Image: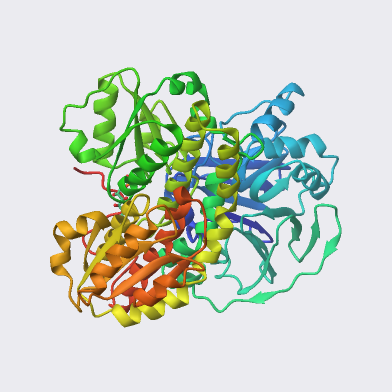
Amino acid sequence: MCGIVGYIGNNKDIALGLEALKRLEYRGYDSAGIAAYDEATGTIVFAKAVGKIENLERKLAGSSIGGSPILLHTRWATHGEATEENAHPHADCKGNIFLVHNGIIENYAQLKQKLAERGHTFASETDTEVLPHLIEHFFRGNLEEAVRKALSLVKGSYAVAVIAKEDPGKIVAARLSSPLVLSVNGSGGFVASDPAALLAHSNKVVFLDDEEVAVVRQDGFSVSDLKNNLKEKEVTELEWSLEEAQKGGYEHFMLKEIMEQPESIANALRGRLLLEEGKARLGGVEHLREKLRQVKRMNILAMGTALYAGRVGEYMLEEYAGIPCEVDSASEFRYRKPVLDEHTASLFVSQSGETADTLAALKEVKDKGGLALGIVNAVGSSIARGTDAGVYNHAGSEIGVASTKAFTSQLTVLALLALFLGRQRDLSLVIGQCIAKELSRLPELVAKTLESAPQVEEMAKKYKGKENFLYIGRKYSYPIAMEGALKLKEISYIHAEGYGAGEMKHGPIALIDENFPTVALCPSDSVYEKMVSSVQEIKARRGPVIAIATEGNKEIGQLADDVLYIPKTLEMLTPVLSVIPLQLFAYYMGVLRGHNVDMPRNLAKSVTVE
Ligand code: F6R
């Protein structure tokens, strides 16, 4: 989710690049950097700063840094904390090649080892730094040739822009699974990770496709594939405002982030599935492998949406790893008398890694000498640093206050963790393979689920006047009922309750009448029949029912007033799909009721106070 800007032209003032970079600050803001070719000295000069772009600006004030071509970057960390060493641009050994990158290099550890054996030295903890060194390895005076050779060896995702002082008249840019766009006009040649950076200069852009390499010069560009076959590219004329461009053409960040889920889930899975072995490879917990084998009990601690992810994790870990779990709000746990022993691990789930209550619960566990694990999105955050080991989500920065893509990536990582721990214990090869295979299909299944957005929008029009909703589910769908209700509350300010369907008869059913709709999670799983009974009970009291059901289920359509279908998958992975129509429903309800869905009233993105 980092922001990339590259420029080549007559304007040697860094203000042009900085202004473009600021348009991308929403993509990442933990550090920023710049590298420019200085013609007078024939060198590439650079500067980096931790934090927002204004810190870099402050550092550059009064300096003589400038030139062309120039690269700029604003970082959303994936590997290594927010430090100057880890900030981009990264360089090769000789200070010839400078590169900025967005994405994840899956095989960086292997590449780094081989390069180190050949004498390359590294200055950062990033995956990115292998790229300039790999390009250096192949560089014989022609930058694009070296970039092509280097990228042929890379696994993962990338959008890169590269310059070299020994081949200075160009920016070489390439992409695989991370967006990159270019534009050449009267002011020069531009490269950026999204069009928002370019709109001030031109609305005529060229979108690169996967495994394409572009050579951008001041007055023209060419695009080829990794084998150097030239490609014809279409120029797209954008009619987006700057704000629309930042939102990828969507009306709100929340919708953009909901729609990004196939990609964010693919990023959570990248390099972590061993399909043949039916295992998960989780680099961040590998050093504790033996200790994790001894874990006999787990506390899962989090707040809000992250807590509901933890509740799904409880079902996964108990069913597939055989580890009894206790899930609690970190805000409650911190004041309880936690019973920890050497076989208990505490797992902290947090998007921001800065939630005050979760952090306090972590401190409590650490003070008592407990083992602390993390599932965190923000690299280098307090929770990421405070835990003994953990797994990053790699969901990219989430701007919308209501958590959507971070939630599904938390579920994905929890499934990976259940697989990892399960295969250390009794989980068989065959079941492990089956889970790994189905996990690998998730991005595609999520993309399919998102196709129902227009239908959800229509449904929201029908229900937008209702003031109360009940959400019910069982087993894996119970936490999803709670998450669906939370999303509706946050975004549309409609009162909603999430319940385990079995609880309904013990109280909430008193609320049901023709004005009190229920969203019933009824995927075709081990508790489907029980859910049908609950739906029947609601219908007997004239309550409207929206069912979330598995494709191909015709029966439920005869009972429920409306049905939203999701693709079939393993029961443990169903929550990743079933939450999507609920996110969309909350979004459309909020929009139809005229609310600011990206910044709901009274809420903050990161709750850093108790
Ligand atoms: C709801 C939401 C919050 C967060 C909660 C924890 O949409 O975003 O409930 O999930 O505040 O935040 P993190 O995950 O940053 O610890």
The picture places residue 262, in percent across and down from the top left corner, at 54, 57
Vertical arrangement, residue 429 with respect to residue 211, above or below: above
Residue 335 position by quadrant: top left
Residue 493 as seen in the image, left or right of residue 313: left
The picture places residue 501, in percent across and down from the top left corner, at 27, 57
The picture places residue 287, in percent across and down from the top left corner, at 51, 22
Vertical arrangement, residue 332 with respect to residue 260, above or below: above
Report the front residue among 355 and 21.
355
Q: Residue at x 53, y 44 (%)?
A: 63
Residue 168 as seen in the image, left or right of residue 333: right
Mark yes or no: residue 530 visible.
Answer: yes
Residue 491 position by quadrant: bottom left
Q: How is the image coloured?
A: rainbow
Vertical arrangement, residue 498 with respect to residue 43, above or below: below
Residue 113 as seen in the image, left or right of residue 558: right
Mark yes or no: residue 64 visible.
Answer: no
Q: Residue at x 34, y 74 (%)?
A: 560
The picture places residue 481, in percent across and down from the top left corner, at 31, 58
Q: Residue at x 48, y 30 (%)?
A: 421
Report the front residue among 360 and 237.
360
* Total number of numbered discs in the rendering: 0
Vertical arrangement, residue 344 with respect to residue 268, above or below: above
Query: Which quadrant, please, contains the C terminus?
Result: top left
